[in-house]
Amino acid sequence: MPNTFDWASIDHPETFDQIAMYRYRDQYAHVAVYREFCDHLGRTPERVLAVSQIPYLPISFFKTHQVLRAGADTSHYFTSSATTGMVPSKHYVPRLDVYEKSFRQGWELFYGPVENYCVLALLPSYLERGGSSLVYMAQDMIQRSGHPKSGFYLDQFKELSETLLALEASQTPTLLLGVTFALLDFAAQYPMALKHTIVMETGGMKGRGREMIREEVHQKLSDAWGGAAIHSEYGMTELLSQAYSLGGGVFSCPPWMRVNIRDTEDPLTRLPEGQSGGIDIIDLANVDSCSFISTQDLGRATGPGQFKVLGRFDHAEIRGCNLLVAVNQ
């Protein structure tokens, strides 16, 4: 029977399904809130015979319940951003090595070793609060890159501009990872030609100006930076894995992560490729919480392991790592 770490070596959809079924039964047995949720739906292990029948826990449960394996350590957790009056999500991560393995292996799958890059992180809203999983990931990438210019930037736009110009002059492969509003502010003040830099936005306007669809954001950034392709990271506090878009707004998942699209009127019904609905995610790196998450994002599957994010449900809170506004595409 697969153990909890087999997720990192998945090489075939059948292997994914086997581990997902094992994970469902394991978390049904050991994660109380997930078991209660499944019981309420009548989706008990005796009735769940295929991955397509596994229920997805609404992401809002991370705001109201402790989604955690019984007996697991509670000393470390990540929290979501939340404006005044909003309740943040709390994701307990008793084994940080699992998170590190997921984001390290996921990054390398799409971009190669982080040691090949200078990593510049423009994440002011995340640095100004504690408990951000994105800051934890960025800090790890900065340290492992080993480049002397790698680091975080708050409002030091002039210093960041000078650093980027120097790195471009030396043709150094560079990652500029930034929250949407900060990248827009920086691009408006410091346009330049970026030929050796990956610009990656993580989403998040957080009320700092007019909400824009992703295509508009990417066009503004690309125009300011010499036509550069704008990449994106899709992640959230409640997940330990990330999907990446290398341009064009189409995200690809690592082998241990899968996106399904649900009917907005009937959340237990799955929609075929090309139809828009709610985004459900299986993240097999979520070993100690819940691997089956029903998000408040709207999206569309575009191919095997690929999807587009179309926005948020009207009633959903707009959060830092999650995009922008719902649009018809």
Image (cartoon, rainbow, N blue to C red):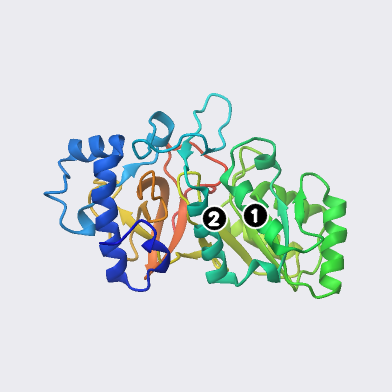
The residue where tag 1 is placed is 140
* Residue 92 versus residue 83 in the image, above or below: below
The crowding category of the residue bearing disc 2, from other C-alpha atoms within 10 Å (few below 14, some 14 to 19, many at least 20), is: some
Res 272 visible: no
Residue 59 or residue 84, whichever sits in front? 59
Query: Which residue extends farthest left?
Result: 46
Say which amino acid is labelled 2. Answer: Glu
The image quadrant where one finds the N terminus is: bottom left
Say which amino acid is labelled 1. Answer: Asp
Return the x and y of residue 89 as percentages of the image width and height: 48, 35
* Residue 35 versus residue 134 in the image, above or below: above
* Residue 249 versus residue 289 in the image, above or below: below
- The numbered mark at residue 100 is 2
Marks 2 and 1 close (CB-CB < 8 Å): yes
Return the x and y of residue 240 as percentages of the image width and height: 47, 51
Return the x and y of residue 46 as percentages of the image width and height: 11, 49
Res 28 visible: yes
Residue 160 or residue 296, whichever sits in front? 160
